[in-house]
């Protein structure tokens, strides 16, 4: 078995990490609870999570500083130092968005995220030490500290990639759902009263059907953020609140009112025909 895969599996199963991870995740969750903070750190207005995009900044700056340290010579020293500093500054918002996303994870994903964050903090510390050494005239030491920082950063990046691509953390959980493009009957109109909601099937697609103030609304029932069941959530002011992480979507069009969701909820058109409620995908 490949060593990286086995290492990740061991981290996933290492329950003692929960003693640190669970209280910290709870604390982070409280800090990011206000809607403006949650939306900002989640990338709600971007249309996808903010953290993966921001990781390019410190990784790019620090890797290029190592390149200049290696082959740039004396003339590149100032540029290398500038890149080290830029990576340190950009690591701050990157870490904030990462902690926001990590606070929603559980189990093995949370444990991997804990080690991922620890590696990134260690890399940041090494680059801070590298910058101090450079400023103090100890360039050789600064280069070695930067090189060590890059190695630790790559290890943390591997774990981050595993969370995204192997564990599907914070990806769009509605992306591959089939949604019927043709009008599809899902429920007798008489079976859905005012203020009521139902989880129904539209050719196998799980759909949340709601009647609110005389209007029919239909959204994909699987929350785009982490796959939570919207039919088990709360319905407030024309919105549905996911029971898992409180992502809030407007019933009219699936737009996001509050993160952590960053991708709008797929919406359906609705109509009543021959006593049956019918839905079809908006495309």
Image (cartoon, rainbow, N blue to C red):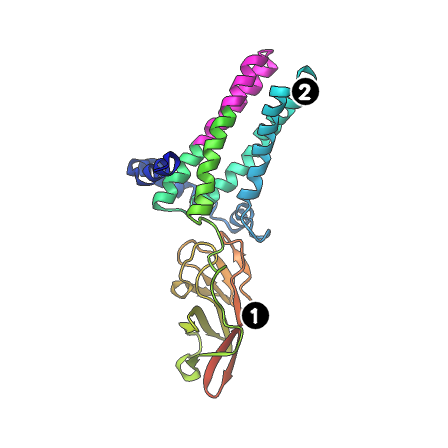
Secondary structure predominantly adopted by residues drawn in magenta: helix
Residue 274, horizontal then vertical, whole percent: 48, 88
* Drawn side of residue 72 relative to residue 252, left or right: right
Residue 183, horizontal then vertical, whole percent: 52, 78
- Going from N to C along the chain, the mark reached first, 1 or 2, is 2
SS of the residue under disc 1: loop
Residue sitting at the far front: 1
Identify the residue at image location x=55%, y=45%: 50
Task: Give yes or no for residue 268 being in the magenta stretch.
Answer: no
* Drawn side of residue 44 relative to residue 198, left or right: right
Give the image quarter of residue 103: top left
Q: Badge 2: few (under 14), some or many (20 or more) residues near its Cα, within 10 Å? A: some
Bounds of the magenta span? 119-148
Above or below, 261 relative to 138: below
Identify the residue at image location x=50%, y=72%: 180
Q: Which residue is mark 1?
A: 282
Q: Which residue is mark 2?
A: 76
Give the image quarter of residue 21: top left
Residue 69, horizontal then vertical, whole percent: 61, 20
SS of the residue under disc 2: helix
**Number of the label disc, if any, that sits on residue 115:** none
Would you say residue 1 is visible in this rendering?
Answer: yes
**Residue placed most toward the observer, 194 or 164:** 164
Quadrant where the image shows the C terminus: bottom right
**Residue placed most toward the observer, 88 or 155:** 155
Residue sitting at the far right: 75
Q: Which mark lies nearer to you, 1 or 2?
A: 2
Identify the residue at image location x=60%, y=33%: 60
Would you say residue 214 is visible in this rendering?
Answer: no
Above or below, 175 relative to 154: below
Q: CA distance from mark 1 to mark 2?
A: 54 Å
Quadrant where the image shows the N terminus: top left
């Amino acid at each position: 078995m490949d060593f990286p895969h086995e290492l990740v599996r061991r981290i996933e199963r290492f329950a003692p990490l929960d003693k640190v991870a669970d209280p910290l995740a709870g604390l982070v969750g409280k800090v990011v609870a206000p809607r403006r903070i949650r939306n900002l750190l989640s990338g709600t207005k971007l249309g996808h999570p903010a953290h993966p995009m921001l990781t390019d900044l410190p990784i790019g700056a620090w890797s290029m500083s190592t390149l200049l340290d290696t082959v740039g010579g004396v003339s590149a020293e100032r540029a290398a130092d500038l890149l080290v500093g830029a990576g340190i500054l950009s690591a701050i918002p990157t870490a904030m968005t990462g902690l926001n996303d990590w606070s929603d994870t559980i189990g093995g994903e949370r444990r991997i995220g804990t080690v991922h964050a620890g590696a990134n903090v260690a890399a940041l510390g090494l680059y801070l030490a590298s910058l101090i050494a450079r400023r103090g005239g100890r360039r050789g030491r600064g280069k070695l500290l930067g090189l060590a920082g890059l190695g630790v950063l790559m290890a943390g990046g591997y774990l981050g990639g595993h969370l995204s691509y192997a564990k599907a953390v914070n990806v769009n959980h509605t992306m591959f759902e089939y949604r019927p493009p043709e009008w599809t009957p899902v429920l007798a109109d008489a079976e859905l009263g005012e203020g009521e909601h139902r989880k129904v099937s539209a050719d196998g697609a799980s759909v949340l059907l709601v009647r609110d103030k005389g209007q029919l609304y239909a959204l994909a029932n699987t929350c785009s953020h982490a796959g939570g069941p919207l039919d088990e959530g709360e319905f407030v002011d024309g919105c549905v609140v996911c029971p898992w992480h409180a992502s809030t979507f407007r019933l009219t069009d699936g737009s996001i009112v509050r993160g952590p969701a960053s991708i709008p909820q797929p919406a359906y058109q609705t109509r009543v025909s021959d006593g049956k409620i019918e839905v079809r995908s908006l495309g």
